[in-house]
Image: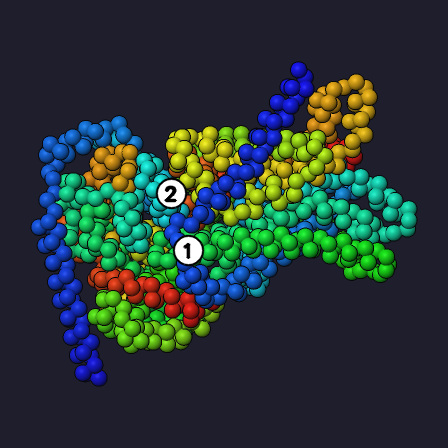
Amino acid sequence: MTSLRFKVLSRRFILCLLWIFAAAVQAQSESTTVDVIQQSSKQWQQTLKAAQGQSVYFYAWGGSKAVNDYLRWATREIARQYRIRLIHVKVTDPSEPVSRLKAENGRTSAIDLIWVNGENFAYLKQQGFLMGNLWATIPNSSNLAVDKLPITVDFGEPMEGFEVPWGIGQFNLIAEKALYPAQQLSAASLLDVAKNHPQTVTYPRPPEFHGTTFLKQLLIDLSHGDPRLYQLASEQAKSELLPALWQYLDKLHPHLWQQGLAFPSSSAEQFLLYQQKNLSMAVSFNPNQWLKEKSTQQISESSERRYFTHGAITNSHNLAIPKHAPNSEAAKVVINFMLSEKAQREKFSGVWGDPSVITTLFDEKATMPAHPELHSSWHVVIEDIWQQKYGG
Amino acid sequence: MATKVRRLGLVCGWSLVAGISMLPILGIVVGLWPQEPLTFAGFESFLGYQGLTTSIVMTLLTAILSSLISLYIAFVVYSQYHLSQRLQSFEKYLAPLLSMPHLAIAIGLVFLFSDGSIFFVDSGLPRKGLATLTLTIVIKEVPFFLLIFSALGRQLPIKNWLLQGKALGYQAYRCWWFLVFPPLLKQSRLALLAATAYTLSVVDVSLLVGPNIPELFAVSVYRWQTSFADGDQVLGFWSNVLLLLLLVVSVSLLYAHEKLAFAGCKSLATQGRRFLVGRISPIFKAWIPLSGVLTALMILVFVLWSLGYDWHSSRPSFSQLSTVLWRDEWLFFALPLQNSLLIAGLAGLLGVALALLALELQRQRGQYWPDYYWLLAIILPQLSMVLGWQILHIWLQGGYHSGWIVLSHLPFTFAYGYLVLKGPFQNVDERYELLAASFGYSLWQSWWLVRFRLLLPAIFTGLAIAFSVSVAQYIPTIMIGAGRVTTITTEAVVIGTGSQQNLIALYVLLQSILPFMAFFIAALLARRFRGSVGG
């Protein structure tokens, strides 16, 4: 028992060291390779001048009133400060602009700015649809807290200046305090809740992103944070680490909402079910959503934020400019504004509550203990096997 | 000279109609053109997807069954109402239900009747399942079929048929089933095709109330097509090919059903056996009042939600209601609402005009093209088709103004206009026109003064449907307009992907307002202008 615990602890320790080391290396490589231009530089002044009077068509998910309201605020500020018209093109799915860029295939784009991360970013970068060198040509990117946050790599794909971090996502549960008394949540304690309060626990159906992340968090817990999860998934690692997850799900599923025979299609749907008191928990990537929803009486006073024992899987959501954007100067000015202290503070303390990505506003309390993303190969493996075992 | 002008007019007319009706084919060919070389491995991984067979069978069954059930219910309801004087213009009672988007009905239904519903009783209606999905579709499609029947009924001599049947000693229900049903079924084939194609490829409703272990096929298609992870685009291609195949299968199933139904009616009529449907049909008189109550409940729920009422707080009270959200959002929904009105007005009008043109040109030729050809815009998978248009539109580099959006809505409004008008158009009694000709009216005069006038009620219905179809378009508006033109639907659909109940409710209501007005006005006008047999 003790030896096991020691093993676990030492693994965690090694992992933490690895993590810190990796972050440090990344930070160093960024700060050494990227030479960010100054606000006062001639080049930036030219950009500002060229940007005046331009319109920026910003393709961003429009399903959240909080985000929409924040962008309405930003639109007013940007118009006032830079005489640029920011237009939020509300999309239902981040893949819509990706599909458009693919259809445009290098012609002048209708898009000036996109909100992107993960596989969509990887695809756009590989296809050469994005404008590079953003970090170097946008003055405020020197504010980015690269040494404190995992914001230089996007799901295993190095950003390399093709996108700029805008905010932080951390996987957490919004849950009823009475049922989830502890701040941290383990796979075992979740199973207990599900057994004692059947039909109140569920997760969005993978490959929905939140659902897959939920499974990743369970896998981290069940494998005690095995370091192989952060490398390319080898056959051996798969056969050693994954069975624990499937055995766990076999036990969990009969106690889930709808006995695990149906799942919410999205985190938004699960949140609505939670709101309607059908569930005891919902999932979120915004570490402050619970506070914001409570303050607007969207959820009960007894709702609390919970995260998994090894820390919350943390990633960034980012801004990018298409290579053939007609108003790229103005888009750069918009990004520069979004990284300013004023915009980042409003984003965090205003209606949205999305944590800041810049050093001056970095706040330990605003975020939960961070856990790195698994290697992207695990993402695919988990989704495929889940579909084989439970999805058909 | 006159013949020259006439010939020129014919050529122009045919090229217009051909242009609009070819757009769907053009779109699907360009949109589905494989960008990467096709490999057998890709096809294999598609076939190996767990749960594919179940998903396809489920999807096909739901699509066929839900539209047939709707058709039969609508027919029985129609037979109960047709001759009742008081309820002769029941269309206006259908307006609220017709104007609510499918998704709104799904949201309302599960909120009112699923577990944890506000009635605190378990009706047994699952949150997600084929039963809920089918029920949602049926509730929404029955009024649609009723509207189609009513447009047809104004041109068919149903009254005479019933009289003849009665004279031969048949009970009323037998006359309906043996004399009225076969021609009505044949004339509403297009509507049946449209309803089936809709259910086969609907994504938003399936995501909310459809089963998802395994998920319905349209959901998988959508997911693969919009995913840029490794290999998913290939799956997207094959799933679209299969979706096309499923559409062909369902078209043939519907044709087979028509044949079977005719045979069934014939054998029942000749054997003279009693059948149960006839005796229980009076029950269906309750359908319209019941769905009226249901719609009223749903609207009430949405209104209360939009005012911030919380059923689930520990002490719900009406004192917490406030109009803050309405006042806040007013600034932001006024312009989209206006855009919707203008685009749908124009697209609806042009679509119906083109549909009339297509019908008239075919009539003059004395030959009608197959129905499914004119309905391709409704039948083909929308996402791939519009992707093709998007590629062409980008290639043309013509900017992103609302003219393009009207053009991208036109194939849909045209198809729905055609669907509504074909039956009434073919059934206009030609003797009236003969009479007009004998009075010395020219072809054009008699068309305008006789045929057009007789068709007016059906044209109003067609306009209302085409208008509301245009209002409801999301994919063409966003993909062709590139976000430059926002409509109430682009806003509502996006809000629907979020989790804020009051806002979702607000936009559902806003989205229903324009179609509601269209249907209501059309119902009132249709009552003023009777068709050729008047009632």
Q: Which residue is mark 1?
A: B38
Mark seen at residue A103: 2
Q: Is residue B325 above or below residue B497?
A: above
Residue beneath the point at 69% across and 45% down: B188
Q: Is residue B9 above or below residue B464?
A: above
Which quadrant of the figure has residue B350?
A: top right
Judge left or right: residue A363 versus residue B263.
left
Residue beneath the point at 68% across and 34% down: B362
Residue nearest the observer in this picture, B207 or B83:
B207
Judge left or right: residue B71 versus residue A136.
right
Residue nearest the observer in this picture, B93 or A45:
A45
Disc 2 secondary structure class: helix
**Identity of the amino acid at label 2?**
Ala
- Find residue A286 and report its horizontal and vertical position in percent: 29, 54
Residue beneath the point at 39% across and 68% down: A386
- Find residue B10 and report its horizontal and vertical position in percent: 63, 26
Mark 1: few/some/many CA within 10 Å (<14, 14-19, 20+): few
Disc 1 secondary structure class: loop
**From where the camera sits, is residue B526 visible?**
no
Give the tally of numbered discs.
2
**Identity of the amino acid at label 1?**
Leu
Residue beneath the point at 22% across and 62% down: A372
Give the foreground label among 2 and 1.
1
